[in-house]
Image: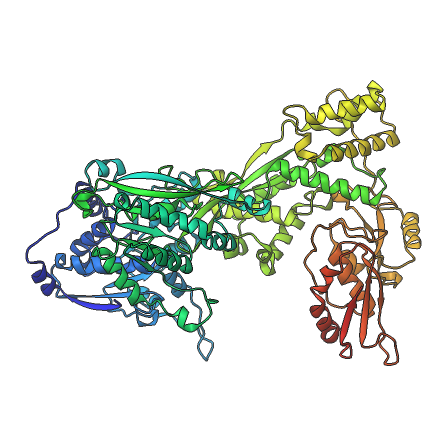
Amino acid sequence: MSYSTIIIEEEQKKRDGRIKSLFPHQKDAYKSLSETFTFPSEQYKGGLVVIPTGGGKTFTAVNWICSNILSKGIKVLWLAQSSNLLDQAYETFIHSAADIHERKQVNIRVVSSSQSHSEPSSINTTDDVLIITTQSAIKQYNSSVLDLQGNVVETAFKNYLLANRGEEFFVVLDEAHHAPAYGCRNLLLNMKDMLGKYYLLGLTATPTYTDIRRRGWLFEIFDQGILSQANQAELIAQNILALPNYIEKPTGREYEVDDRLYNRLVREHKDLPEDIVERIAKDSLRNNYIINEYVQNKNTYGKTIIFVDRWYQCVYMETKLSELGVNVGSVFSKIDANSGSADLRNQRTKSDNERIIKEFKEGKIDVLLNVRMLAEGADIPDAKTVFVTRQTTSSILLTQMIGRVLRGKRAGGGENKTEANVVLFIDNWKQVIDWARPGIGEKGPTSPTVRGYYPLEYISIDLVEKLSRQIEIGDFSGVAPFIKTIPIGWYITNITVNVSGNSEEETKSINEYVMVYEDNAEAFINLINFLLEENSLHEDIWGNEDFDEKYLNEKWFKDDVDVLIKRLEKQFFIEENKSVGNILNRDIGCIVRHIVQNKAVLGDISARPDYYSFDVRHEYDLTTLVLYVLKKDYNDLAQLQYLKNEFSKAGSLWKQFYKTFGNFKIAFEIEKLRILEGEITELPVVTPPNVIRREKELSETEKEHVKRRDGFQCVCCGYDIKRSLEIDHIIPFSMGGETSIQNSQTLCKTCNGIKSNNAINFKDSYKSLLVSPKKFVLYPPRRNDRPINTLKRIINFYYHCNAVSNINLHTRKNGANYSVWEVELYPENSVAWLEQHKEDLLSYIQNDLGYKHVVEVEIK
């Protein structure tokens, strides 16, 4: 089904006077639609109709549109998420065409990437009903393809919209809970700007979001709010929907995820990654358990839809069920590209799937296996049972799968269908994961998910990292007062992002924490006030789509966005008040994105990120703790016992800060040493001691001493041109680093610029403390650099220390290392880390440095 010209008179003859009766909730929707969308109108209007899955929302909308929109000669654009939904809408328009009056014919076109549908390029201005996937519409609207002359070619879809500019135009968004998603909402709002006026109807079975920001976008788009909402309980009572009977079946299979993945599942509500899904799908014991569950209870379960994850899972279960005498079929849209052969990949066509679904509808097949392709839009009202074979964190996806069997007896489910079985297969996960649960809510998580770390985790990570650096340096006298490392509070920023999966696209509300310290609190206040000023959000912010993208990742900070972040950083933050941990650019990005997204929806006041004060901060001042112990004059054993009690007592945060007692005790001793060397003897009564920091720069005499100590060369790359040498803090001043000879090293201008505000010791650190290697960056060679300088710079920054012991190379043909260069690392530095980038390094030497004669790089 791709294009049809419907002759209205012929459809009216086919109907032969028979009119499908409407249920009360459908009549209510009709009335609300007619009252809201009045013609003619000079303004945009958008409204929602909420009908539970199985309650006939597609029929309701199409039937009303035929009578009230197409009959007036108004064109209709129907947006949906999947090809199944497009087919359902198309068939419903065909069946309802007899309700169109005062017209002879209507042209209907279906557009998607499916071979059975029309290509986007075929869209014509004569199309009366254009049914297209939301994804295709977004792509066609945003297309910027150039012709041979370099001019942008407008797509057929965009020309279709332009042809209706200023005209009455009706748009339907099926599965309207997708509206707040970035691409979808921008399409709808941009169409509003382009067309000047149009009418938007959103259809959804999913109640509106409780989260204010996603709800804000939803009602920015659907400005008339919810026009009509059917209650699921009432539809069940009327036998329009079947009562779901939830049956949990523990599989007995145990699975585990690592800490990093667990963080993504719990905080970000991501679904399981592909490798875990693959492992579950291939678990033959688990698949056999599911098969046996049906076979042993097939009289109870009857006509059953089974949702699985992989095509080979379909094939395996179909084979086993068939061997056990079950009439079974399976449908799937594509096979893994690595399946072995084109014949295997092409063994299942769309016509095969259509035939099998038809046989299932006709009762020739009792069990239908599918790879989630029926989650939205498939209309099999008399199916009695659904098997959800794997847990998911997506409540919307779960709701759609369950909805396939919820048609009651008055809605075509059969005379005896008052209940529907929903069989949920539950695995034993070693960690507690917030899986979506039926009946809990179809809105997704009610509270925003967290990306990054929680405040106490940020504190802990920073304290432990700082402790490691101090141990590495071995000089504890230059340590800053402990209280300076504890934030005074934090901002919670919130944005809405897309979360796309195999069968669904959802929006999530994401929280990120921005830590605030004594030294930068005022700077953050000034930045936020600036961004909330009426004219402060210049075009480079408001007009930059990157601020509204899905993910805040490394790529996000490049090019013009990076320039903007740096501009704001320079405008509001000085060296002394930058964020602990050198994440200021990330923190500014969080603040800006929060305000950009939320100011448009919530207004200036609500767009200000919430600030939370860390009120118990001074209860965890290590300086106060040390002074207390010194005043008590404890012996070693008594001191140890006191610290153990303090660390482990109920409600204490020391354990959250330092994780282990060993870390806590080392930090205590470092703070004790700092206090004793500073001759602080009095215990402060209320506030922590006011420790005076040294100046930011060493004196000229001290600088000369550091350069002489370091041999008047850069301790990272070995560059020795004196006029280019600078003095750098090993631990930056902004991170509490002392301005002292011990905390200083000699770097060239290039290495100092690359190091920036990171804490890296190139002076006497010969072993990397990294758990895993950093990103491998091939920095461009500097003028006057010798190749050994350039290579040492690249490798030492990669290892985050002075890892290179020696580089053996010759540029003359008679040299021992002319064609094979050698890199020697200090012991205990992983050779394997650099080995994985050896080809890139060799190419860099040959092409960027210009030494074509080098054929090998050996790493020792």
Hey, which quadrant is residue 747 in on the image?
Answer: bottom right
Q: Is residue 412 above or below residue 664?
A: below
| Residue found at x 32% / y 61% | 83
How far across and how far down the image is residue 292, in percent? 36, 48
Q: Residue at x 73, y 21 (%)?
A: 686
* Looking at the image, residue 657 lies above or below residue 47: above
Between 478 and 502, the one nearer to me in the picture? 502
Q: Position of residue 354 (x, y in %)?
A: 27, 63
Considering the image in quadrants, where does the C terminus appear? bottom right
Left or right: 347 as drawn, with respect to 262: left
In this rendering, the answer to whether 289 lies above or below 365 is: above
Residue 41 visible in this rendered orientation of the protein: yes
Q: Residue drawn 85% across and 81% down? A: 813
Q: State the image coordinates of residue 562 (x, y, percent, origin top left).
A: 61, 56
Where does the N terminus fall, quadrant-wise? bottom left
Left-right relation of 300 to 286: left
Residue 211 drawn at (x, y percent) = 43, 39
Residue furthest front in the image: 324
Colour scheme in use: rainbow
Q: Quadrant of residue 845?
A: bottom right
Q: Nearer the viewer, residue 299 or 335?
A: 299
Q: How many marks?
A: 0
Taking the image as shown, residue 8 lies to the left or right of residue 81, namely left
- Could one spot residue 494 in this view of the protein? no
Foreground residue among 654 and 540: 654
